[in-house]
Structures are given as C-alpha cells and as structure tokens.
Amino acid sequence: MAPCQGTSMTHTLSGKPIRDGYMRRTIAVTGATGFIGRTIVRVLHEAGWSVRILVRSPGKAKSLAEFARDQVQGSLSDKDGLRRLMAGVYAVVHCAGAVRGVTQAQFDAVNVDGTANVIDAAAEQDVAPRILLLSSLAAREPTLSPYAASKWKGENILKQNANGIPWAALRPPAVYGPGDTELLPLFRVMARGVAPVLGTPESRFSMIHVDDLAMAVLRWLTQDPCVTGVFELHDGKTGGYSWAEVIDTVGGLCRRKVMLLSIPAAVLLLPAVANWVAGLCLPYAPMFTPGKLRELKHHDWVCDNMGFTQATGWTPSIPLEQGLRKLPGWPGFAGTQSNRV
C-alpha cells in the first residue's frame, strides 16, 4: 500500500502548511523497541515508508536497524530530541507509553506530559506532521487505575492541543502476537490444560493480533484527507470473547481439554498491594498493582471497530485461531512438530 499521494495542502489558522503528501515519505515512531512498536516499524518499512525512530537505549534498537536505520537518541522528555525526530516527516506514530508504576504522577509524566511534548515538537516544524496516538481501551474507563486515567488524559491533551494538526488516537484491546510478554505466557499455561481466569467467567473482552493493529496504522497513514477521532479496534469478533470461547479455541489447537480455574480477586489483592507498597518505597515500577487488578476484574472490554472501518476501509484479517497458530513458543504453534504438551 503506497503512501498518500494527495496534492493539496491544508493550513493552520496561522497559515503554516500541515500536510504535503508528495514530498515527505518518512514516518517518525516513538516506542519503537516495544512489542507493538517493533511490529509497526517493520510493517511501515515493508510498505515502502522510510522510518525514523526515537530510542533511549541504542543497544535495544540494534535489531531494528534493518527497518529503521535513521535513529534519534532521546526520550519523550527530551524536547530537542523530539524536534530532531520530527524534522521533515510526514507523520509521527506515538507508541511510547508507561505501563508500569504506582502513582498517577508516574504515569502522567510519560502518558500525558510526553504526549504534550510530542504535540509541541510537531507544531514547531515548518510543516507539521500528522499525529497518531496509540492509546488503550483502558482509556474508556479512566476511574479504574492511574494507567487508565493517564491514557484518557493523553487523548484529551491531543484533542485540545493539536490546534489544526491532523490527528487520531487508536484504542486497541488486548494485543497479542510474536514478542508478546503478557498474553503468550497465559496461552502457554492454557495449552498445558489449565486456564487461570480472574474475575467472573462471564466477562467479555475483545482482542487483536499485533499485525492487524499495525495494518490499521498503515491504513490511517494513507488516508487523504486525514481521518480524525478516537477509534476502537478489534479482530472482527463482534461482541468479543468469553473465557469459554478462548479456552475452546486453545484446547482445539492443542488437542486437549483445558480446565477453567476461576481465581477470586481477593486471592490476588495481597500481592497487588505488596507490589504497590514496594513501588512506593523502592526504585521499582511494578505491573501488577491494585489498579491493574481493577482493570482485570472489569467485566466489559468489548470493542466496536465500525467507526474506524467506515472511515478508512480497514478490516481485520487475523481471527483468534489463526493468530494463535502464528504464535511461536507455545504448543499450539503451527511450526512445532506436535501440538501436544
């Protein structure tokens, strides 16, 4: 899919041009070394875009050199680095974010202030790039956790401060795929015959394969004029999944019965609180905290991707069973000699 080839330019109220589809084929990406960012960088490169990435640690970005030779050292708090990242680019895909921490200030420093810095750096360019924020479905429920609140605030900063710069925010649900460190361990446990489920088995949730998410980013970049708004995405399963449906899918792929093990939230409250206290007292940023526990207990994480599909023509292509077959490192992987554990 080729980059946008529109000839028109639109302008801010100050008269600065904000788009030029002909001259700029470079995409800036923050958070490129993360699970989702790596896939987006690869997909953009394969689609013919030149990719420039922001890296805090050059060592972590060595494996991306094949897809993004243009690397700018810096962080979301480094305003000069952000300006260099965005110099002359067509768009910035803002993937970087904090997912670990205990206090609201810790999350806001990255997910809110960092987003504001990205917007400011874009606005300072002679030709401002369009901005795509990779948010989270958690932003739909900002009262659940400091993380959810920070993602909601980040979206609102983008809405309020864009000032004529084309923008959009994507809210993916649970994202899985190669390189995933959260859902893949759970699938491995399920493949061994036990599915530990937190909260009520009646909870429903949407999912999306990381390749489908990256293709949604690519589709948004090709739209002329830019599609603006906050959009949810999912893998095409209307109404999302129940745990029973996921368990049946995993069991079918691994050719074994998988038993649902319901874990009361009270059992996990103590370790969540212990992590939270440790995060307050030590130089430690935990993932599993009371806020994360509330997110996991929430009964409805079902998405509706109709808005994004109607606006861009994007449709997901990887249903859960196919996506699981593509996951290396677990017994259901199609590349293994046997699907038995």
Image (cartoon, rainbow, N blue to C red):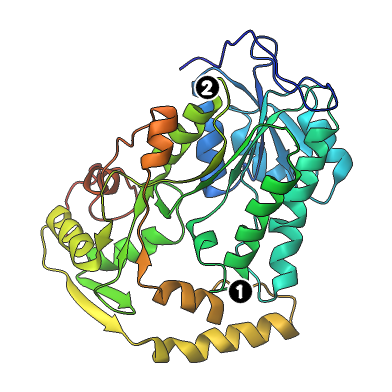
Give x and y (percent) for residue 21: 64, 14
Give x and y (percent) for residue 293: 48, 78
- Nearest the viewer among 271 and 189 is 271
Q: Is residue 142 above or below residue 12?
A: below
Instruction: Name the residue located 57 percent from the left edge and 22 percent from the top edge.
Output: 225
Instruction: Name the residue located 25 percent from the left edge and 45 percent from the top edge.
Output: 325
**Quick one: SS at disc 2?**
loop
Residue with the mark numbered 1: 286
Q: Image quadrant for the C terminus?
A: bottom left
- Nearest the viewer among 84 and 172 is 172
Give x and y (percent) for residue 135: 56, 51
Q: Residue furthest front?
A: 13
Q: Image quadrant for the N terminus?
A: top left
Q: Is residue 315 left or right of residue 43?
A: left
Looking at numbered disc 2 in the image, what kind of residue is underneath it? Thr
Looking at numbered disc 1 in the image, what kind of residue is underneath it? Pro
Which of pointers 2 and 1 indicates the residue nearer the eye? 2
Question: How far apart, in angstroms, are the residues tagged by discs 2 and 1?
Answer: 38 Å
Crowd rating for badge 2 (residues with CA inside 10 Å; few <14, some 14–19, many 20+): some
Residue with the mark numbered 2: 222
Instruction: Name the residue located 40 percent from the left edge and 91 percent from the top edge.
Output: 267
Q: Is residue 243 above or below residue 159?
A: below
Q: Is residue 43 above or below residue 60?
A: above
